[in-house]
Image (cartoon, grey):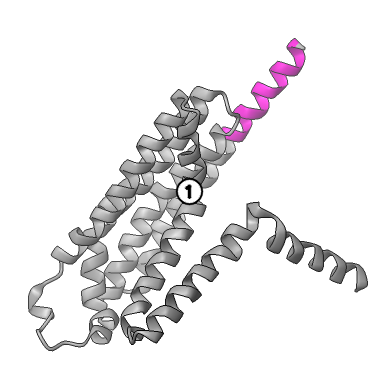
Amino acid sequence: VEYSYAVFGKYLKMLAYDSKYSKFFLGVPGILLLIGGVATVFGYTEEIFAVLVSILGISFVIRAFDIDKAWSNLTRPTPMGFIRIFTMVAGILLILSSIPTGVSSIDQKLIEADTEIFKIVTDKIIIGQFITGALPILWMGFGAIFAGILLSNWIGGVPRQITDILRIIVLAALYPITSQFIIIMMNGDVESITLVPPLLAGLAATLVSATILFRKYRKHKHQEMILD
């Protein structure tokens, strides 16, 4: 137990004093608390919630897709860095453009002038139409980001092609599953069992692809060991 507390304390100290981790685990919450406090003083408590959620979402996206690391490569530009930055910016623009596309796909008859925001957000039909319209461009944005990572690693000789390819395969496999889930959510007559076929197909495609790629990788490594 004492050893576990010591390890836990070590990680807490790392989060607090290591600049690699503290800028995200302490910096982002600190900025959110500061903005929230200032907004509360000036009476913008309700409006600031959307701003805080947006900032938190942007920070998650930046950390998840290594946008900060890719941006730092501008100081030492390389062909791989330019490819990753270009596809990253293109992917983010596509992801952002999916929002107005989703909004425009909503039937305006469902949204009245005096309709509350809470009712709009909790309406299954409205949310379903929004996601249906935004989903293709949203997936294209993620695909552009993942393809850029794959291409830059392949050109740079980074041995991560298997992970990058599997990431794209999983993204493609999740698309029909997500689409079918939205259909089930919007239409109560559609049974939930219809979600099983795309789920099984996506799982099978992922497992088969992973098996083929890992066998190819092991065969390649075995040939390298024989040559050495």
Q: Residue 52 appears at what percent x and percent y?
A: 40, 72
Residue 107 vs 227, above or below: the answer is below
Seen in the image, is 103 located left or right of residue 20?
A: left
- Figure quadrant of residue 84: top left
Taking the magenta stretch, the answer to whether it contains residue 174 is no
Residue nearest the observer in this picture, 78 or 118: 78
- Figure quadrant of residue 146: top left
Q: Residues within 10 Å of mark 1 (few under 14, many from 20)?
A: some
Q: Is residue 188 visible?
A: no
Q: Residue 106 appears at what percent x and percent y?
A: 15, 69
Q: Is residue 3 visible?
A: yes
Write the residue at 19% across / 61% down. 100
Bounds of the magenta segment: 213-227
Residue 184 vs 158, above or below: the answer is below
Residue nearest the observer in this picture, 174 or 134: 134
Residue 81 vs 19, above or below: the answer is above
Write the residue at 47% across / 72% down. 32
Residue position marked by numbered label 1 in the rendering: 65
Q: Residue 82 appears at what percent x and percent y?
A: 41, 30
Q: Residue 80 appears at what percent x and percent y?
A: 47, 27
Residue 6 vs 38, above or below: the answer is above
Residue nearest the observer in this picture, 29 or 141: 29
